[in-house]
Image (cartoon, rainbow, N blue to C red):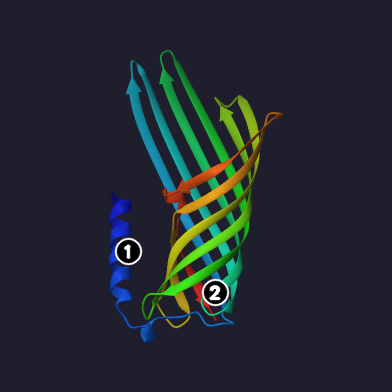
Amino acid sequence: MKRVLFFALLLGFATLQAQNSDEDKRTISKGTWNLGIEANLSTYNAESQNDGSSLDADRFSVGFFPRMGYAFSENLMVGLRTGYNRTKVENDLAQQPNFNQSESKTEAFTFAPYVRKYYGLGKNLLFYAQGEAGYVGSWSENITNQTNRSTTESDQFYVAFRPGITFFVSHKLALESSFGILQYSSNKIESNGAETTSNGFDLGLDSSNILFGLSYYF
């Protein structure tokens, strides 16, 4: 519900800004450089009980994504996006007479060139459509009852479309947010000597794919 309200407010604000004349709409000039960083934060907790057993699950994820871009034409920018993400998941399963605990930690690094097209909506507001092709490498450790340990390595190559908005709070400083991602990816996963591969399309609209950040244009 909160996500629906957020997008409704965003759409309403963009509609009001779009009523300005073309002369009043912001543009990104050719030759402009951009330095920025985006971040996401995701938390999740679930508890369930059923026939004498109970499950308590906690998930925490945080990511930082620095990037740099250059406008080789008006409102058209190319750049490089990098990133680091860390996720921790804890599960406590009580099932009489046993009590089982498991924990997983994952670290991921991103490297992705991108192309971004801006569309002016007002004097300070722009919509952008970003296409990117990148690589994500991740490493996971899974622990069960502090005795059983396993590790997993993953290599992902992807192409993606990511929409967002840019709002200038001053002449050069802007707040930015991207919301959701549509991507096609190819994955190779190695876990305890076994290797699996997968590929397919994915539409991500959860909190891990909603990014907020700052950008400096000069």
Label 2, label 1: how far apart the Cα atoms are = 23 Å
Which residue is most to the top? 97
Residue 171 location (% of width, % of height): 45, 83
What residue do we see at 33% from left, 69% from top?
14
Q: 170 or 136, which is in the foreground?
A: 136
The amino acid beneath tag 1 is Leu
What residue do we see at 59% from left, 46% from top?
185
Quadrant of the rendered structure where residue 9 is?
bottom left
Of mark 2 and mark 1, the one earlier in the sequence is 1
> In this rendering, is residue 22 above or below 128?
below
Q: What element carries label 1?
A: helix
Residue 73 location (% of width, % of height): 57, 79
Q: 58 or 67, which is in the foreground?
A: 67
In-image side of 124 versus 39 (left or right): left
The amino acid beneath tag 2 is Leu
> In this rendering, is residue 12 above or below 74?
above
Return the mark for residue 10: 1
Residue 152 location (% of width, % of height): 64, 35
Q: Do the residues under discs 2 and 1 have CB atoms within 8 angstroms?
A: no
Residue 11 location (% of width, % of height): 31, 64
> In this rendering, is residue 47 above or below 73?
above
Return the mark for residue 76: 2
